Image (cartoon, grey):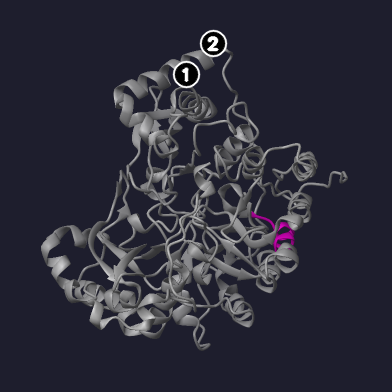
Amino acid sequence: MSVTESAPPIGRLGFARHEDVDVFVERLEAFERGEVSPDDWRTFRLLNGVYGQRQDGMMMIRAKIPAGITTPKQLRALADIADKHGGGKGHVTTRQNVQFHFVPQADAEDALRLLAESGITTKEACGPSVRNWTCCPFAGVAAGEPFDPTPYVDALARYLLRGKYSSSLPRKLKPSLGGCCGTDCSQAFINDLGFLARSRIAADGSTELGFQVLAGGGLSTLRRSAITVEEFVPVGQLLEAADAVIRVFHRIGNRHNRAKARLKWTIDKIGVPAFIAEYQAEREVIRAEGGVPLVLLEEPAPPVRRAALSQVSETEPGYAEWAADSVRPQKQAGFSAVVVRLILGDITSAQLRAVADLATQYGEGEVRLSNEQNFVLRYVPNNKLAALHRELALVGLAKSGANSVADVTSCPGASSCKLAVTASRGLAGILTDLLDARPDLTAATKGLDIKVSGCPHGCGQHYIAGIGFQGGMRKVAGKPAPQYLVYVGGGIGADKANFGRLIGKVPARRGSATLERLLDFYNAAGATSHAFWSTVSADVLKALIADLTQLADADATDEDFVDLGESKPFELQAGEGECAV
C-alpha cells in the first residue's frame, strides 16, 4: 500500500519519505511469511525506529526529531499517534526524540504513516546508525553565541540521513551540534561526534565562522569526555568533517565485540594521535573525491510581532514562581523563550495539541525539545508571558521549577526496557514529588540537577548529574531487592564532561531520604554548582549516607522487595537490550 506524498510542514522541510514505510511493511509481511529471519527482521525494524520492549509483541516507536524542532502539524500528528497507539501520551527523551511505548507490532505501520504524513521520520532512530542530532533549544536566541547553529545541524541531519555509511556502522553513533554562550548545552562532550560553534579573526581581519570537532564521548560502563579532533573547521567544511569521522568509524570500528564497538573504544584502542591521523587521511580522500558542498536551507523567519521592551507586572497566583525558572530573555529585545516543564518527559495528546496552538498564537510557530526532556517556546513577547502562563495552566503545563533541581530526568527503565534493572521512573516520580513538596529545599539548592537511570548504560544521564541514581540489585535474605547506586559531582562544562563519583548503594526505598540528606549537606555548605562535590573527600561523602546503605536481613520488610511504582516482587530479568544490536 502506498500513500501520496504530502506537502512538507509549513516553514520547515520534513525528513520523512513514504517509501521508507512501504519498504517497512513489505519486510514485515515477508517476516510474517517466514521469508525473513527473526535476526534480520530485528536489525531492519531497529533501523526504522521500531524497538522491542520486554513485553512480548509490544514495541517502542521512536520519532527522530533533528535538533528537537517540531512544527504544530507534527505535534498534532504526535498527538494522534498517542491517542491511537500510545495510551494517550508521548515521552520526550534526553536525545530530543519522542517515543511511544506499548505499541502492538501490528499497529506500527499506521504509526509510521502518521509520522511520515507530518514530515517526521523514524529512519535510523535506532540500530547501528547515525542517531538523532541534538542541539541547544536556545540556538539562535541565546546571548553570546558566535552564530546560530540551527541551519548547520539541519544540513548535517539531511546529508547523513540514509547516507552511504549511516546505517551500517559497527554500533550506534550519537551526534550533537551546539555551542551557544561558549558552553556545551548540546552535550557534545558525551557524544560520539560533536561540533561546537566557534569564531576567529581571519588574516584579513574579518570574522570567520566554524566549529570545533569532537569525537569519542560517551557514558555507560566506560565514560569518556570527547577528544578534540580539530580545533577549528570552517563552516563550509562541516559536512566533510562529519563524513570523515563516520568513515573512520565505519572502516576500523570493532565489528566483533558489541560491548567494545562504540567509537570511544576505537579511539582507546589505537590512541588519540592515530585516530586524528586517520581522520585527516579521510579528509584528504574526501577532498580528492571533490568534497562535500554545504547546502543550507533558509531558516523560517519568526513571526513579526510588536514586542514590549519591558515585562508587564502580573500578580496572578503562581506566575512569579513559574517565571523564575521558565522564562529566559532572548538576545532579541522584548522577547523571551519559555521552558515548558514536562514531568519525567511525559506529555498527553491533549497537551500536545494545546502546545501546537500556543506555539502559533504566542511563539515562532514551532517548538523545540530539550535534552532535559522539556519543551521550549521561543519568541514570546514579554507582554504576552502572563497570558501564555494562563493558557499553559489550563492544560496542566504551568508547573514551576523547569530546569531546576526539582526537574528530575529519567529513562523509561524496567517498565519497558529489556536492559533495565529497576523501574527508574518509580524513583524519579517519588523524587519529583518530594522536591515539589519542599520549596524550602529547592529554593536553597542552586546549580544541581537530578537524573535517574534504570541500569549502567545511563540513558537517564545519571553520570553527568549533580546527583545521579543508577538502578541495581542486591541480595537480602537470599532474595533480590532493588537498589540504586548514588553518584555525585557529574556535569558538562565548557571544555569537558565530568563524571560523578560513586559514594554508595542504597535500597530503592531509601532514595528519597538519600537525596534529602545530600541536598541538606550541599545547602549547608552554601554550594552553588556541581563542582562543590569535588571539594569534599570521598570518605566524607560515603560516611554521609553510610547508614542508609545498610539493610540487614532481619530489618528488611516486604516493601524492600518490591520496586518503586510496582506491585509484584522484584526480580532481575536478564534480557538482551536491542540498543546493542
Q: Is residue 270 left or right of residue 50?
A: left
List x then y, in percent, for residue 573.
47, 60
Single out the residue that lies furthest toward the top: 288
Is residue 398 visible in the rendered structure shown here?
Answer: yes
Q: Depth check: 548 or 112 in front?
A: 548
> Which mark, by number, is residue 546?
none
Q: Nearer the viewer, residue 376 or 304?
A: 376
> Marks 1 and 2, how far apart in space?
9 Å
Type of amino acid at the residue the image marks with label 2 = Ala
Which secondary structure is most common in the magenta stretch?
helix
Residue 71: say if magenta: yes
Q: Residue at x 56, y 45 (%)?
A: 132
Disc count in the image? 2
Query: Residue 269 or 520: which is nearer the viewer?
Result: 269
Instruction: State left or right for residue 141 relative to residue 464.
Output: right
Magenta span = 70-78
1 and 2 marks in contact (CB < 8 Å): no
**Residue 206 at least partly seen:** no
Task: For the N terminus, give its image quadrant.
Answer: top right
**48 lies left or right of 279:** right
